[in-house]
Image: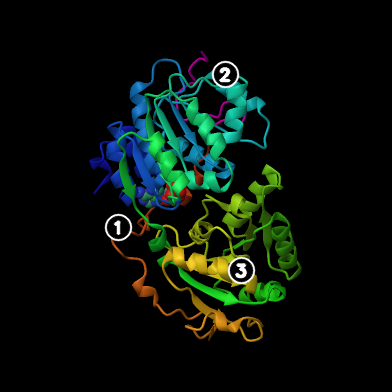
Amino acid sequence: MQFNELGLSEPLLRAVARAGYETPSPIQQAAIPPALLGKDVLGCAQTGTGKTAAFSLPILHRIDQLAGKEPCLRALILTPTRELAAQIGQSLETYGKDLDLYHTVIFGGVSEKPQIAELKRGVDILVATPGRLLDLMQQGHIDLSKLNIFVLDEADRMLDMGFIHDVRKVVNALPRSRQTLFFSATMPNEIKTLADRLLVDPVTVTVTPVSSTAEKIDQSVYFVDKALKPKLLLKVLTNPACERVLVFSRTKHGANRIATALEKARISAAAIHGNKSQGARTTALEGFRSGRVRVLVATDIAARGIDVDGVTHVINYDIPNVPETYVHRIGRTARAGQEGTAFSFCESEERRDFRAIEKLIGMKVTEVSEPGFEAGTAPDERPQMAPRHHQGGRPQADRGRSDRGGRPGQRPMGASGDRSSERRSPPRGRRPGSVQKARSGPPRPAP
Ligand code: AMP
């Protein structure tokens, strides 16, 4: 299927072509046509599948048809993190370049003032994180009465991050008659219940079921004593194939400690987590994107949704205690048709959590070991699998590369998407303040 078969308007087709996308990804093929018809959509898809365009393109198309002379808030996109919010803003900017629409992005951790000023000038589409949205709603800066479309992005992540209560508050303030597009990588019960409440007769689109996403990544686990994890990390990183590595730490403090130890060992590293300023997070991310920073150490909250291509390795320095988090973490590699590897460092106390992960993904993760780093305790816990030793730094998995990927309908993107050109394009015609808009003509007067 081609983009011009989806029913999108010419300006959007031009924007998609400029972005270098050749064919719509599976979620785009499945979600865009019903979304254009105004139907509710339940999308089970994680980042990396092209879901942002899957909701942004139909929103821009529909809002462009509805837009009057003055900007008026017609679409709200709620997303859990500031990074995701900013990325969605960038996508709207890219795809909406030839349309006469305004959007803005609001999130916490930065001054409210420019955001309020922008809202006062009027926007058609608002991208927001829940906390700041509620703050500004309570202050009376946001009028949701004319809203036509509501997008809930990464609903399961909202739950993980403790935002579900805020999400419910926002939902209660929305007009009843509206279109809802609901995206979640996983469907825990609480999210299913929320989806049932929000969606009316939705079209359900599932592109990468959790387990199959995990299957496509070359995963292995080291059973290692806690005290040896720092050294094991250094050892693993001696492999030059570990070019762009995302290390997950359960705590902010741990993330700092890991990054400092790496820097000491002359491995360029940076940490991102909620205690870092927005500026520090942006610098770390840019460094990671550009390749200046080889290892980015992140907490789950900070890392979720980060759109960085070419992550060669994800390392679970700590094992997450929510199994779905593992899937989210390793999903940061092997994106858009690239190969990816995930290592987990599992100490004896984490074995139970790791078994829960294996249950969720429906497969046994290949056990590997480095001489001198074998776990000293509980070796009888995994009797089925003999440890293997690294050869040339990369664990030898049971499965060859050839039996992953290339399964029709499961690989997210074609390799053709030119993401770099999207990122390189300069923001156009920014209004004063921290705002991006999606139009090329002179600004419309503020209402
Ligand atoms: P997302 O899942 O929305 O985070 O998108 C992942 C990446 O895929 C982004 O960098 C997009 O620019 C890119 N992308 C989205 N749609 C396509 C497409 N149809 N072809 C190629 N790349 C795409």
**Is residue 432 at all visible to an observer of this figure?**
no
Task: Report which residue position mark 3 lands on.
Answer: 350
Whether residue 83 appears in magenta in the rendering, the answer is no
Q: Is residue 195 left or right of residue 423?
A: left
Indicate which label's residue lies in the foreground, 1 or 3.
3
**Is residue 255 at all visible to an observer of this figure?**
yes
Residue type marked 2: Lys
Task: Report which residue position mark 1 lands on.
Answer: 409
Residue type marked 1: Gly
CA distance for labels 3 and 2: 50 Å
Whether residue 441 appears in magenta in the rendering, the answer is yes
Above/below status of 328 relative to 98: below
| Number of residues whose C-alpha sits closer than 10 Å to that of mark 2, classed few (under 14), some (14–19) or many (20 or more) | few
- Closer to the N terminus: mark 2 or mark 1? 2
- Closer to the N terminus: mark 3 or mark 2? 2
At horizontal 62% and vertical 73% (from top left) the residue drawn is: 237
| Number of residues whose C-alpha sits closer than 10 Å to that of mark 1, classed few (under 14), some (14–19) or many (20 or more) | few
Q: Secondary structure at mark 3?
A: helix
- Closer to the N terminus: mark 1 or mark 3? 3
Residue type marked 3: Glu
Q: Nearer the viewer, residue 281 or 130?
A: 130
What's drawn in magenta, residue-wise? 429-447
Q: Tell me where residue 9 appears, x and y as whole percent.
A: 29, 33
Q: Is residue 248 left or right of residue 76?
A: right
Q: Tell me where residue 100 appears, x and y as whole percent.
A: 41, 25
Q: Tell me where residue 205 appears, x and y as whole percent.
A: 32, 47
Task: Report which residue position mark 2 lands on.
Answer: 120
CA distance for labels 2 and 1: 44 Å
Q: Find out if the beta carbon at label 3 lies less than 8 Å from the nearest ligand 1 atom.
A: no
Q: Secondary structure at mark 2?
A: helix
Q: Nearer the viewer, residue 73 or 241?
A: 73
